[in-house]
Amino acid sequence: MPPAELDFAVPATVEEAVAELAGEAEAIAMGGGTSVAMLLKNNLIFPDRIVWLAGVPALRQLAVSADGSLAIGATVTLRELAAAEPVRRHAPALAHAAGIVGNPRVRAVATLGGALVHGDPRQDIPPVLLRPGCGSRDRPASGRSPWPGSTPASWRPLWPTVSW
């Protein structure tokens, strides 16, 4: 279980989230918490701070961009992905995969960002996003990775959007 002195940050913007994650404390990002909670419970990670991303509006976007690509924020839940008309129309394989992960309770809280950074090879979402033309629009990264097993080059602060 996490220590009683675990700090919990709730940023309102991507910039605030990046600052919290890049601070002196050993921080980890959390959107839905399905993976992070399990890792904490099983004593597999030992962060000093959890940075809760669910309240950052820029990470909640799910829309068709002006260029016709699908823009999906890191904290959009798998349930939202499966049900969203733009996803069903532009990326039916992604909508299908999001709709069969885990169970309804998991899909209600698990996020796209969590599915991408958790690194479990049995995940349904990452292989769907390997299709040609799918990528992330990101910002230059610096500092430590907030996710176990990833590097600053792979997390490019918080993967604000995935485009399809």
Image (cartoon, grey):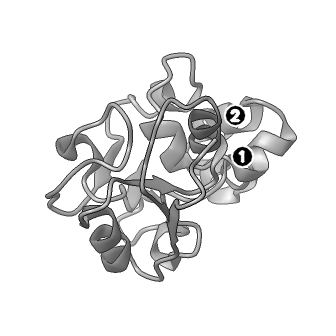
Q: Residue at x 65, y 31 (%)?
A: 97
Residue identifier under label 2? 96
- Sequence-first tag of 1 and 2: 1
In the rendered structure, the answer to whether residue 42 lies left or right of residue 144 reads right
Residue under the image location 45 percent in, 55 percent down = 29
Say which amino acid is labelled 2. Answer: His
- Secondary structure of the residue carrying numbered label 1: helix
Q: Residue at x 43, y 49 (%)?
A: 47
Q: Give, as a three-letter code, the residue at label 1.
A: Ala
* Res. 47 visible in picture: yes
Q: Locate residue 52, reporting x and y percent.
A: 53, 65
Q: Which residue is mark 1?
A: 82
- Mark seen at residue 145: none
Say which quadrant the N terminus sits in. top right
Residue 59 sits above or below residue 100 on the image: below
Q: Residue 36: x percent and y percent?
A: 56, 43
Task: Give the camera-side residue of 147 and 126.
Answer: 147
Q: Answer whether residue 52 is visible to the viewer in this image.
A: no
Apparent side of residue 143 relative to residue 89 in the rendered image (left or right): left
Question: Could you tell whether 53 is left or right of 162 in the image?
Answer: right
- Residue 162 spot, x, y in % from top left: 40, 52
